[in-house]
């Protein structure tokens, strides 16, 4: 097992308004990899917005149909009364948030079961078994079958890593595991598909581990775990080559730094004034 030294400690800081940071023992604050990657992810955000709209539309239609049946044969309701009744039935929490909460509960449960299984593998003392959503167990069973098939041998779990050279940090789900005979970085993702940011994240972790001299992982894997029954089955995705992804990650980090600087200037009132053009002059007039 890898030896943990005092220099390998850091504190996670989630108190900031724009993402997660890690604070090293000497006070250095490094943004998390996932915070940096918020500068991209347009495809994922676009799909989430579309899905959210569809879910809420379907919820409104269902509630409206039920209300129509319930009031059939009664005196007509005023428009205001109808809207108030609809609002009350829909509830304060939107439908997509309810579904997301359940999905996150399932995904979190699968993650807890995987972590417990791997901690047992490396000989750690286990506490009480986690209480998880029932739908998490069949998903975990699929993952367990895969792990047994590839002879997965974990070395370290939930480990913080960072790069002082490039200025980022993060927490790996599974730091250095042997998959077959290859030292591998594995990251778990829940959802219906693996987005490109996952490949960038995996490459950043591999580079950080190498910089910290904890190993030389030659491979990255992304294990996509379905959030709920009925979603696409367990998927094991080979991470794109580090040589292809890490420079892209650093470019994304530069974009993120630019955006952060701009937002900080706006908040402090030091942002440059907007350029005056003939169009803006005409609009002001």
Image (cartoon, helix red, strand yellow):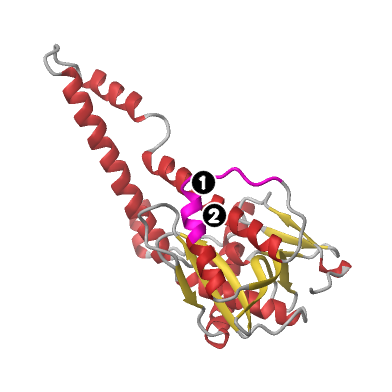
Q: Quadrant of residue 98?
A: top left
What span is colored magenta in the figure? Answer: 128-141
| Rendered location of residue 117, percent (x, y) | 64, 59
Name the residue furthest top: 75
| Rendered location of residue 258, percent (x, y) | 58, 69
The answer to whether 201 appears left or right of 45 in the picture is right
| Rendered location of residue 183, percent (x, y) | 65, 82
Whether residue 199 is in magenta: the answer is no
Secondary structure of residue under mark 1: helix
| Rendered location of residue 26, percent (x, y) | 86, 65
Q: Quadrant of residue 159?
A: bottom right
The answer to whether 152 appears left or right of 43 in the picture is right
Locate the N terminus by quadrant.
bottom right
Name the residue furthest left: 73
Q: Residue at x 53, y 80 (%)?
A: 248
Whether residue 30 is situated above or below residue 112 in the rendered picture: below
Image disc number at residue 110: 2
Q: Residue at x 52, y 75 (%)?
A: 199
Q: Of 182 and 275, which appears nearest the observer? A: 182
Tell me how far mark 2 sits from mark 1, CA to CA.
9 Å
Image disc number at residue 105: 1
Q: Of 100 and 274, which appears nearest the observer? A: 100
Q: Of 80 and 129, which appears nearest the observer? A: 129
């Amino acid at each position: 097992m890898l030896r943990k030294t005092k220099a390998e400690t850091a504190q996670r800081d989630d108190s900031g308004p724009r993402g997660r940071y890690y604070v090293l023992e000497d006070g250095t604050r490094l943004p998390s990899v996932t915070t940096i990657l918020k500068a991209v992810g347009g495809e994922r955000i676009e799909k989430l917005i579309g899905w959210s709209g569809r879910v809420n539309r379907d919820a409104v239609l269902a509630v409206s149909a039920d209300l129509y049946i319930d009031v059939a044969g009664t005196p007509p309701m005023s428009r205001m009364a109808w809207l108030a009744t609809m609002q009350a039935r829909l509830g304060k929490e939107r439908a997509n948030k309810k579904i997301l909460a359940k999905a996150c509960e399932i995904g979190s449960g699968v993650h807890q079961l995987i972590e417990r299984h791997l901690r047992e593998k490396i000989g750690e003392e286990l506490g009480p078994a986690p209480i998880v959503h029932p739908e998490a167990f069949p998903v975990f069973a699929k993952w367990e079958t895969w792990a047994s098939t590839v002879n997965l041998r974990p070395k370290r779990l939930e480990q913080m890593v960072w790069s002082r050279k490039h200025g980022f940090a993060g927490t790996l789900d599974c730091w250095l595991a042997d998959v077959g005979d290859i030292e591998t970085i594995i990251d778990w993702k829940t959802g219906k598909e693996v987005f490109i940011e996952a490949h960038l994240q995996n490459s950043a972790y591999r580079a950080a581990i190498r910089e910290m001299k904890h190993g030389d992982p030659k491979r990255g894997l992304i294990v996509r775990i379905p959030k709920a029954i009925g979603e696409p089955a367990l998927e094991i995705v080979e991470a794109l080559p580090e040589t292809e992804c890490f420079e892209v990650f650093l470019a994304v980090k530069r974009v993120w730094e630019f955006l952060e600087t701009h937002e900080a200037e706006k908040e402090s009132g030091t942002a440059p004034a907007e350029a005056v053009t003939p169009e803006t002059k005409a609009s002001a007039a």
